[in-house]
Amino acid sequence: MFSIGDFAKHGRVSVRMLRHYDAIGLLRPAHVDPFSGYRSYTGDQLARLNRVIALKDLGFTLTQVQEILDAEIGVDELRGMLRLRRAELEAAIAADEARLKAVEARLRSIESEGTMPSEDVVVKSLPAVRVAELTGTAGGYVNEEIGPVVQGLYKDLFGALGPITPSGPLIAYYEDDADGERVLIHAAVPISAETDGTEGFSTVRLAEVATAATILHRGSMETVLSSYQALAKWVDAHGYRANGPAREFYLECPEDGDQWVTELQQPITKA
C-alpha cells in the first residue's frame, strides 16, 4: 500500500488531484482508515491513474473519462487514441512553428523598410535550360499553401526521373492561373538525357533571359519574404518592371532548411 503522498509521487500527479478523483468516484483509494481518514492505494491502481491522465490529456472531460473506463477500454484502443492525439499535437506544433517563421519574415521586412540592398542585387542574363518538370496548383502566394505543394511535386518528380540524373540545381517558378485567383507551381530540375514523353513528367525548355535582377536568400524558404520584397523594391527603384515569372534557383539544399542558399531570379525590362 502507498500513502496518498507516495501514490501521487509515483503517478506524477498532485495530492489535491487524487482527492478530487476520489470525491467524484473516478479513482477511489484501495483503503481508507476509518479513524484517521488516511487514504491508501495499491500499485495496481497506477494503471487506472495512467488511463485517467492519458484520456484527460486527449481532451475528454472527467465525466467522459469515467464512462470510457467503465466500458473497460482495451490497451490497444487506448494506445491508438494516444497515437492519434500525438499526431494532432505534432501537426499543431509544426503549424505554430511555420506561423512563427512567417511572423519573423514579416518582421524582417518591416525592419528593413527604408533601406535599399543595392549591393546585394546582381543584374545578369540567365541561360536557356532544358528541364524536367511537374506542375501543381496552390491557393495563393502564402508559404503554408505553396510549401506542401512544392515538396509534393519534387517528391513525385524525383520518383518519375528514375535513372535520369539532374544536370544542375533545382528550379521552381510560379505563375498566376487564368483567373488570377490561384498559383501555378512549376517544380523543375535540369536534365541532359533524352526523353520520349512517357516518363511521367514534362520536358520543357526555359528560354534564355536577357536581363534578370537576382539576389541570394540564405535560410529556409519560410523566411524568403524579406528577400523577395528587397528584390522587388530594387527593381521598382531602378526603373524596371517584371518581365516574366520569378525563378527560385536552389544552390544549396542541405537537410537543415535554415542552411539553404537560394538565388531569387526576376526577369526584368525597363519600365
Image (spheres, rainbow, N blue to C red):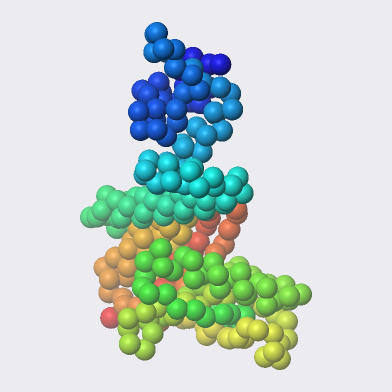
Q: Which residue is drawn at 62% across and 75% down?
A: 157
Q: Which of 167 and 176 is in front in this view?
A: 176
Percent position of residue 138, x then y? 42, 75
Which one is in front, 65 or 106? 65
Task: Indicate whether 33 appears above or below 215.
Answer: above
| Residue 14 visible within the image | yes
Looking at the image, which is closer to me, 153 or 187? 153
- The answer to whether 255 appears left or right of 6 in the picture is right
Question: Which quadrant of the rendered structure holds the C terminus?
Answer: bottom left
| Residue at the (69%, 85%) spot, across then down | 199
Q: Quadrant of the N terminus?
A: top right
| Residue, far left | 114
Rendered location of residue 79, percent (x, y): 58, 47
Query: Taking the image as drawn, is residue 121 in sight?
Result: no
Residue lying at 36% horizontally and 73% vertically, measured from the top left: 140
> In the current view of this chain or complex, which residue is farthest to the bottom?
196
Against 4, is 20 above or below?
below
Residue 97, x across and y down, in percent: 42, 50
In the rendered image, the residue lying farthest to the top is: 35
Query: Residue 246 location in percent, x, y?
Result: 42, 74
Residue at the spot 56% in from the left edge and 73% down from the top edge: 153
State left or right for residue 115 relative to residue 68.
left
Instruction: Give the answer, above or below, for where 161 lies relative to 83.
Output: below
The image quarter in which residue 62 lies: top left
